[in-house]
Amino acid sequence: MPTYITLTKWTSEGIGNVDESPERLEQAKQVSEKFGGEFRDFYLTFGQYDLVYIAEMPDDEAAAQAVLTIGRGGAVETETFRAFTEDEYREVIGGLSE
């Protein structure tokens, strides 16, 4: 399954209720599963983003639906990227024509 990296910032609502964040994380995992995906890694971070998670999702549509569902809860803003594994990277590069 394709891999997606989501960079996440708490909204004022999210940081104001930061003690509820672990419960919201579990809900986000359930949302990913609802759309056929799976959380792979999760990190609390410092700097521009507060949280980073990595998930595998069946396709771009499922990833978008999951991220939109999580975002509409109002506790976080997200920025999501499609990520390629090393094997996928090598396949992409190997397919370049000179």
Image (cartoon, grey):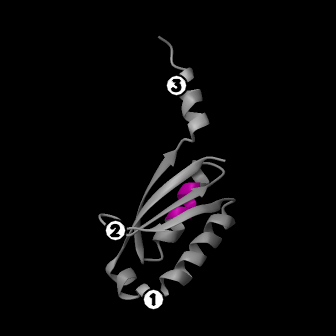
Q: How many marks?
A: 3
Q: Amino acid at mark 2?
A: Phe
Q: Earlier in the sequence, mark 2 or mark 1?
A: 1
> Circle 2 is placed at which residue position?
46
The x, y position of residue 31, in whole percent, is 62, 69
Q: Which mark is residue 54?
A: none
Category of crowding for the residue at label 1, using alpha-carbon neighbours closer than 10 angstroms: few (below 14), some (14–19), many (at least 20): few
Q: Amino acid at mark 1?
A: Asp
The residue sitting at 61% across, 35% down in the picture is: 87
Q: In the drawing, does residue 17 fall left or right of residue 47?
A: right
Q: Nearer the viewer, mark 2 or mark 1?
A: 2
Say if the magenta span includes residue 9: no
Q: Which residues are magenta?
A: 63-67
Category of crowding for the residue at label 3, using alpha-carbon neighbours closer than 10 angstroms: few (below 14), some (14–19), many (at least 20): few
> Circle 1 is placed at which residue position?
19
The residue sitting at 41% across, 85% down in the picture is: 18
> Circle 3 is placed at which residue position?
93
Say if the magenta span includes residue 65: yes
Q: Are marks 2 and 1 in contact (CB under 8 Å)?
A: no
Q: Earlier in the sequence, mark 2 or mark 3?
A: 2
Kindly report the distance in space between the C-alpha atoms of the residues bearing marks 2 and 1.
17 Å
Kindly report the distance in space between the C-alpha atoms of the residues bearing marks 3 and 1.
44 Å
- In the depicted view, which residue is nearer to us: 39 or 13? 39
Secondary element type, mark 3: helix
Q: Amino acid at mark 3?
A: Ile
The x, y position of residue 8, in whole percent, is 41, 66
